[in-house]
């Protein structure tokens, strides 16, 4: 359960970063 929670948090952070950072920089 602990590992799953960490992975979920990492995924959420990645999605937030992608939304915050402009598409050009993501590419």
Image: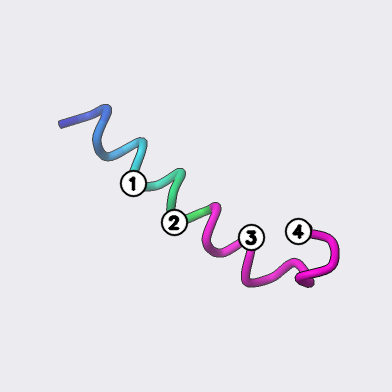
Q: Earlier in the sequence, mark 3 or mark 4?
A: 3
Of badges 3 and 4, the one in the foreground is 4
Q: Which residue is mark 4?
A: 26
Instruction: Name the residue at 33% across, 46% down.
Output: 8
Tell me the crowding category of disc 1: few under 14, some 14 to 19, or many 20 or more residues within 10 angstroms, Cα based.
few
Quadrant housing residue 2: top left
Question: What is the C-alpha distance between the residues marked 4 and 2?
Answer: 16 Å
Q: Which residue is mark 2?
A: 12
In the image, residue 7 sits, relative to residue 21, either above or below, namely: above
Q: Which residue is mark 3?
A: 17
Is 25 on the left-hand or right-hand side of 13?
A: right
Q: Earlier in the sequence, mark 4 or mark 2?
A: 2
Give residue 11's position: percent from left, percent from top.
44, 49
Tell me the crowding category of disc 3: few under 14, some 14 to 19, or many 20 or more residues within 10 angstroms, Cα based.
few
Tell whether position 20 is magenta.
yes
Instruction: Name the residue at 64% across, 60% down.
Output: 17
Give residue 18's position: percent from left, percent from top.
64, 63
Furthest residue toward front: 27
Q: Which residue is mark 1?
A: 8
- The answer to whether the residues at label 2 and label 1 have Cβ atoms under 8 Å apart is yes
Of badges 4 and 1, the one in the foreground is 4
Question: What is the C-alpha distance between the residues marked 3 and 2?
Answer: 9 Å
């Amino acid at each position: 359960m602990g590992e799953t929670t960490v992975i979920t948090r990492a995924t959420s952070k990645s999605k937030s970063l992608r939304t915050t950072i402009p598409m050009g920089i993501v590419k």
